[in-house]
Every structure is written in C-alpha cells, then in structure tokens.
Image (cartoon, rainbow, N blue to C red):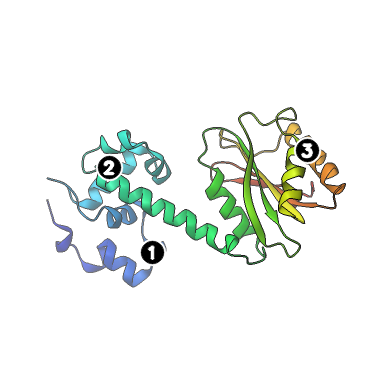
C-alpha cells in the first residue's frame, strides 16, 4: 500500500484544500481530512471511498446511528462523537445569524437555517419563526408533531403563542420525511386557514417552507401567500 505521504502534493487532500479551496475536494477527500488516518492495510482516502460506498452518501453516513457507524472498520465511538460535534457546530453556524437579532434579509439564509433544523426528523413537525416588527427573530418554536393535516394544526394555539411573544410576523415551516417537498392541497388549506386567523390579530405570514431531502418548497416563491 502506498502511503498518502508518497502521493504528489497536489493530490493529497490537505494540501489540495490549502491550494485550491475546500470546494475543490471530493466527498471522499473531505471525509479523509476528517478521519485523519486510515486503518491497517488501507489508506485514509481509500477508507473514505469505501465508507461512502457502504453508506451511500455523506448524508447517510452523518445520519447513521452510533451502532451502525461503529460497526465499520476504521470507525469507532471517538470518531462518532467527533462527527456529532462537527454537525452540531454546523447547525449552530447556520442558526447564529438568525438568532442574534439581525433582521431577516435573505430567503436563502432563512431556508438554509430551516432545512438544517427540520430535514432529519423521521416524523412531521410543524413549526414557525416568530419575528418582531423589523423581522428580527424572536424565537423558533415547534408546535405540532406527527401527521400534519387540518385536524392536527390548531390556529388558536399558534395565535396564542404569537400574542405571548408579541410577534408581528411569522414564517411557517414543516417537513416531509418522505423527502418530497411538494405541497399538498391540505398544506395549502392549512396555510390559508392560518393566514385568515392571524390577519384578525394583525400578524402577517411571510412564507411557509416545506422542507424535503435537499429540496424545499416556498409558498412565497410560488405566489401562494
């Protein structure tokens, strides 16, 4: 087995990142930098390629349970803990600009934050970003869990929370665990019902995001709200 140290410098993941930037690296090269070392008889890049083949994708690897993660050669509890710490730092990085009191100015930023929050739930969650009159985030609140339909989403509960937090506007969000973010008629009906209810207390719904697997639907972008 050839050691990575014997590879041309421009082909080594760390050197390649420094010279060309992180976006120039493949998934296996990025994973190799995270893992740092291979195991007996296999270099770290080859190990990374094998792991991606076994799990199917970076997303699947990152979402694996501790038991499944640690079953693989070259991995263990220490790597699992390290990975979870990196993932949580990434979530907080996305969350920080929204939660420090800055006004929302970017739909992309909002969508990225909501996707990071919602996409990995194995069940449906209906939530909202509560905003003040300058569209600064007051709170992210999860309201309902399970199958989301007109019977399970109660406008009165949302209105009470909005009044409690003195919110002037909200952004609705819920996830589709199937991965398909397409809006159903029930989704549209629920949204319109909430728009009508919150108008009575002078609170505007700015958008409703449906989060899927790497995809999303924005009611505002579709002109549905």
Give percent across and percent down for residue 85. Answer: 37, 52
The residue at which mark 2 appears reads as 50
Check if mark 3's residue and mark 2's residue have beta carbons within 8 Å.
Answer: no
Q: Is residue 145 visible?
A: yes
Name which quarter of the figure residue 24 lies in.
Answer: bottom left
* Between 72 and 52, the one nearer to me in the picture: 72
Against 46, residue 157 (above or below) is above
What is the number of the mark on residue 22? 1
Q: Say left or right for 74 vs 153.
A: left
Report which quarter residue 52 is drawn in.
Answer: top left
Q: Dot 2: what SS?
A: helix
- Mark with earlier residue (2, 1): 1
Residue 61 image offset from top left, x and y in percent: 37, 42
Query: Quick one: 221 or 171, which is closer to the camera?
Result: 171
Q: Is residue 55 above or below residue 134?
A: above
Residue at which label 3 appears: 156
**Number of marks:** 3
Sequence-first disc among 3 and 1: 1
Query: How far from the left and from the top, in percent, is residue 186?
Result: 75, 32
Which badge, 3 or 2, is on the more N-terminal residue? 2
Mark 3 vs mark 1, foreground winner is 3
The residue under the point 21% across, 43% down is 74
Q: How far apart are the two marked residues, 2 and 1, measured between alpha carbons?
A: 21 Å
Q: Nearer the viewer, mark 3 or mark 2?
A: 3
* Structural crowding at the residue carrying mark 1, measured as other residues with C-alpha within 10 Å and reported as few (<14), some (14–19) or many (≥20): some
For residue 78, side relative to residue 162 (left or right): left
Element under disc 3: helix
Q: Residues within 10 Å of mark 2 (few under 14, many from 20)?
A: some
**Residue extending furthest toward the front:** 164
Q: Residue at x 69, y 53 (%)?
A: 130
């Amino acid at each position: 087995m050839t050691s990575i140290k014997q590879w041309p410098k421009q082909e080594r993941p760390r050197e390649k990142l420094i010279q060309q930037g992180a976006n120039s690296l493949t998934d296996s090269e990025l994973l190799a930098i995270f893992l740092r070392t291979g195991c007996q008889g296999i270099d770290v890049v080859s190990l990374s390629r094998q792991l991606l083949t076994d799990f199917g994708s970076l997303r699947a690897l990152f979402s694996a349970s501790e038991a499944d993660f640690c079953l693989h050669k070259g991995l263990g509890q220490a790597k699992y803990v390290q990975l979870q710490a990196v993932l949580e730092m990434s979530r907080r990085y996305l969350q920080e600009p929204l939660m420090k009191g800055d006004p929302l100015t970017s739909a992309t930023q909002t969508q990225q934050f909501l996707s990071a929050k919602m996409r990995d739930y194995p069940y449906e969650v209906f939530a909202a970003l509560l905003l003040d009159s300058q569209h600064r985030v007051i709170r992210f609140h999860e309201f309902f869990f399970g199958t989301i339909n007109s019977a399970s989403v109660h406008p009165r509960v949302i209105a009470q929370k909005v009044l409690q937090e003195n919110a002037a506007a909200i952004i609705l969000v819920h996830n589709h665990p199937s991965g398909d973010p397409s809006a159903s008629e029930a989704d549209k009906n629920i949204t319109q019902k909430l728009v009508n209810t919150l108008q009575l207390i002078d609170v505007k719904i700015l958008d409703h995001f449906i989060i899927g697997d790497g995809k999303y639907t924005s009611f505002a972008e579709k002109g549905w709200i």
